[in-house]
Amino acid sequence: MKPETLSFFERVYDVVRQVPYGRVTNYGAIAKYLGAARSSRLVGYAMNASHTKDVPAHRVVNRNGLLTGKHHFEGTDLMQQLLENEGIVVKDNQIQNLQDVYWNPMEELR
């Protein structure tokens, strides 16, 4: 992997570590905050590689609130369980109260 890719991953992890308990953000919002608006897929790759880091990856979902990364967590429903433990309502792999729990790094990390 190129050094600049690893650096980008670390920058993603820094943002995700700041997502508060009981809140979620999405891949595109992180990419936009990092000045790489078209790199939401790369943010997803970073999340896939984050499980050996101290990163609350369960707080990153797709723009519609779908738990698209859930298959990267051990166990079939671990991502959902972690979110529900934080008070987030999930039904059919989708966050139900997305507008209420959405955290936008562009607004929160100025």
Image (spheres, rainbow, N blue to C red):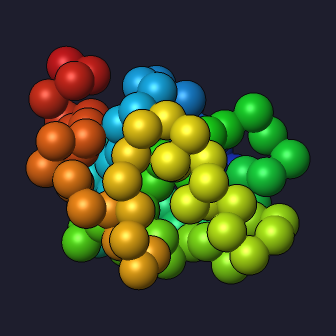
Residue 54 is situated, as x and y percent measured from the top left of the image, at: 75, 33
Say if 16 sits above or below 20 in the image: below
Image quarter of the C terminus: top left
Return the residue nearer the eye: 6 or 83: 83
Return the residue nearer the eye: 12 or 89: 89
Q: Residue at x 74, y 65 (%)?
A: 73
Say if 53 sits above or below 26 in the image: above
Return the residue nearer the eye: 7 or 48: 48
Residue 59 is situated, as x and y percent measured from the top left of the image, at: 48, 47
Q: Is residue 99 left or right of residue 9?
A: left
Residue 21 in view in this figure: yes
In this view, the residue farthest toward the top is 110
Q: Quadrant of residue 75?
A: bottom right
Image quarter of the N terminus: bottom right
Residue 34 in view in this figure: no
Q: How many marks?
A: 0
Residue 55 is situated, as x and y percent measured from the top left of the image, at: 66, 38
Say if 53 sits above or below 18 in the image: below
Q: Is residue 71 left or right of residue 108?
A: right
Q: Residue at x 13, y 49 (%)?
A: 99
Q: Is residue 74 left or right of residue 49?
A: right
Residue 21 is situated, as x and y percent measured from the top left of the image, at: 46, 27
Q: Residue at x 56, y 40 (%)?
A: 85
